[in-house]
Amino acid sequence: MTVAPFWDWALRQYAREPTQALLLTLQSQADLVILEALYAAWLSAEGYRLKDQDIAAMRDTTGTWIEEVVVPLRALREQWKGDAGKVDARRHLLQLEVEAERHLAELMWASTELLRSGPQDGMTKKMPTAEALDNAAKRMNANMLAVSGFENGKFASEREQLVALLLQST
């Protein structure tokens, strides 16, 4: 299996207006890395709960890429917003940012191979009972708590709102 199922899912989620608006707000207010949040949610939807070692492995693999590539590209693109003379350059930066995010997805995917090769925690997609949905919400909330921006219960109501939006469309 490749990263494509996650990437496609993430693009669909991000394209949904209430989800996109909330993610962008959290990106600016909580320094959320949107793709990390979406990956944590996707793993939840697939039945996986992140453990401390998974989070550590993911951060070891992705930290430098996020800090030295993704965040600076985003910051520069935002800095050029509103500059009529840099519209084309800004569009190009957006393309580079998407490519950088795709590489980030591949890094996250590789860093969680051990987790994804293990057993799921019992959620069955074929039987979306109230109990299964409740378990999925609990797992997604737990996974989201591991994401920078949500740790230590920060932005709890926004996290719960994001979980609800993502569960609606998963």
Image (cartoon, rainbow, N blue to C red):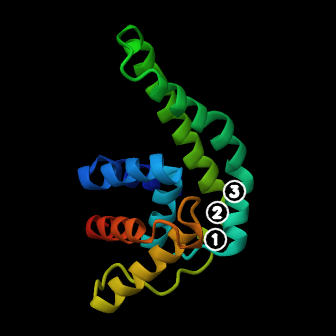
**Amino acid beneath label 2:** Thr
State the image quarter where residue 112 is shown.
bottom right
Mark 3 vs mark 1: in front: 3
Q: Earlier in the sequence, mark 2 or mark 3?
A: 3
Left or right: 150, with 167 as reference point: right
Q: Nearer the viewer, residue 66 or 42?
A: 66
**Amino acid beneath label 3:** Arg
Above or below, 117 against 104 in this view is: below
Q: Check disc 3 and report its element: helix, strand or loop.
A: helix
Q: Check disc 1 and report its element: helix, strand or loop.
A: helix
Above or below, 8 against 69 in this view is: below
Which residue is under mark 2? 112
Left or right: 86, with 61 as reference point: left
Q: CA distance from mark 3 to mark 1?
A: 14 Å
Residue 41 pos. (x, y %): 45, 65
* Residue in the image at 32% along x and 49% along y: 20
Q: Check disc 2 and report its element: helix, strand or loop.
A: loop
**Amino acid beneath label 1:** Leu
